[in-house]
Amino acid sequence: MMLNLAPNIADPDDFYAELVNSQRNLDEEQALRMNARLILLLANHIGDRTVLTEAIARARAAG
């Protein structure tokens, strides 16, 4: 499996709004913890270590 970089989220604007709203009324630490839990849930769903390693590398390089 390869990391899919093509747009693949139905209604991406709605998803973005949902993601932003999920952190409403959270302080910075709570938001960071929520993001960490979300990352781990999605990483577990993906499961493929090669894909996860590539995603980490790309995310780090983008910063």
Image (spheres, grey):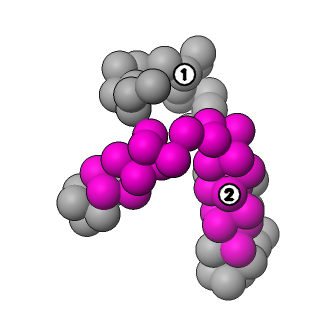
Looking at the image, the residue that sits furthest to the left is 61
Of residues 51 and 7, which is closer to you in this image?
51
Q: Can residue 19 be seen in this view?
A: no
Residue at 45% across, 25% down? 1
Task: Tell me residue 45's x, y (percent).
Answer: 70, 38
Give the residue at mark 1.
9
- Considering the whole magenta stretch, tell me its main secondary structure: helix
Q: What stretch is highlighted in magenta?
A: 33-58
Judged by depth in the image, the label closer to the viewer, 1 or 2, is: 2
Q: Decide: is 37 above or below 21.
A: below
Q: Please tell me the numbered disc located at residue 40.
A: 2
Amino acid residing under circle 1: Ile
Residue 63 visible in rendering: yes
Task: Choose the circle earlier in sequence order: 1 or 2.
Answer: 1
- 18 is within the stretch colored magenta: no
**Residue positioned 30% across, 63% down in the render:** 60
Q: Where is residue 23 in the image (x, y as percent from the top left)?
A: 71, 61
In the rendered structure, the answer to whether residue 34 lies left or right of residue 61 reads right
- 26 with respect to 16 (left or right): right
Q: Which of 7 and 21 is in front in this view?
A: 7
